[in-house]
Image: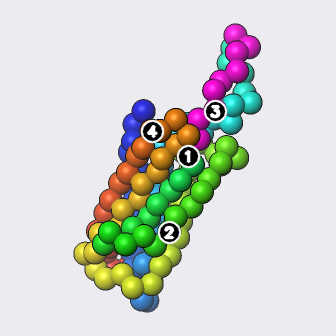
Amino acid sequence: MASRIRIRAQLKGGECEVKALMRHPMETGLRKDQLGETIPARFIETVTVTHNENIVLEAHWGAAVSANPFLGMQFEGGSVDDIVKVSWRDNQGETGEGETRIRQG
């Protein structure tokens, strides 16, 4: 599975605004394929956002989140060129991550 996350972090008036788009199928385990077989559950369980290696957000998701989820959040204390990293782990042990530097908004 592709572990690509498109991420942008922008400083706006003392707060850092983070936007991330994660590629993930997010299957509930309730749908069936064309042969009538149940598609196994596969969904992101944990999303972590760090700023210079410090956790600023840890979210616990479930099967109700749509495919290719979007995350938008803000935190205080960022500076231009600081590193922001978004990572996820799904219920099958797959992981994905992306990082960017904060830019001026």
Work out how far the residue at label 3 is from the one at label 2, CA to CA, in angstroms: 25 Å
For the residue marked with disc 1, what is the amino acid?
A: Ile
Residue 7 as seen in the image, left or right of residue 25 = left
- What's the residue at 42%, 44% (across, down)? 95
Mark 4 lies on residue: 94
Q: Give the residue displayed 45% in from the left and 38% down from the top.
A: 94
Within-10-Å neighbours for mark 3: few <14, some 14–19, many 20+: some
Q: Secondary structure at mark 4?
A: loop
User: Mark 4 is on which residue type?
Assistant: Glu
Residue located beneath label 1 in the image: 44
Residue 42, quarter of picture: top right
**Quadrant of residue 40 within the rendered picture:** top right
Q: Earlier in the sequence, mark 3 or mark 2?
A: 3
Left-right relation of 97 to 39: left
Q: Which residues are magenta?
A: 35-43
Closer to the chain start, of discs 2 and 4, is 2
For residue 41, the mark is 3
Residue at mark 2: 57
* Of callouts 2 and 1, the N-terminal one: 1
Picture residue at 44% right of the left edge, 64% below the top:
49
Q: Secondary structure at mark 3?
A: loop
Q: Residue at x 25, y 75 (%)?
A: 81
Could you say which is closer to the camera, residue 75 or residue 47?
Answer: 47
Q: Amino acid at mark 3?
A: Ala
Above or below, comparing residue 43 to residue 36 in the picture = below
